[in-house]
Image (cartoon, rainbow, N blue to C red):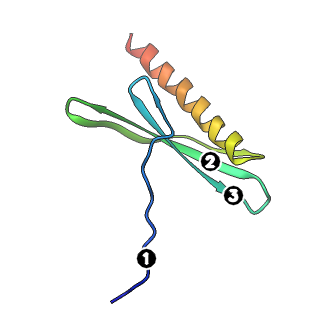
Amino acid sequence: MNSRLQPTLERTPSMHYKNYDIFVIAFPRPDGHWSASGEVQKYGAQGLEIAQQFSGPFKANSETEARLAVIRDAKMKIDAILAELD
């Protein structure tokens, strides 16, 4: 029996925006910068409606800057999708 703990990835959205969940993951880069990308999910009456890679990757000087770049981009794309539906 393997007694080593298996790593788990927690799936908590970084932000809820207009009924969409925005998930962001950021990694440190070897050059001292950070890289982040995001995924968007939307649940409706029938369950999961949208789940896709949506934003990034973005390179930034800090983890916070990289995450914020993903969130800004995802929000603009969500707004564009909703505008097309009107």
Residue at point 64%, 36% (across, down): 68
Q: Position of residue 85 (x, y in %)?
A: 38, 15
Q: Amino acid at mark 3?
A: Pro
Return the residue found at the far bottom: 1
Return the residue found at the far top: 86
Quadrant for the N terminus, please. bottom left
Q: Position of residue 52 (x, y in %)?
A: 42, 42
Q: Secondary structure at mark 2?
A: strand
Above or below 23: residue 45: above
Is 74 left or right of 30, judged from the image as shown? left
In the rendered structure, which disc, 3 or 1, sits on the residue that comes first in sequence?
1
In the rendered structure, which disc, 2 or 1, sits on the residue that comes first in sequence?
1
Residue under pointer 1: 5
Q: Position of residue 45 (x, y in %)?
A: 21, 29
Is 83 left or right of 69, judged from the image as shown? left
Q: Position of residue 40 (x, y in %)?
A: 44, 38
The span from disc 2 to disc 3 (Cα, nearest Å) is: 9 Å
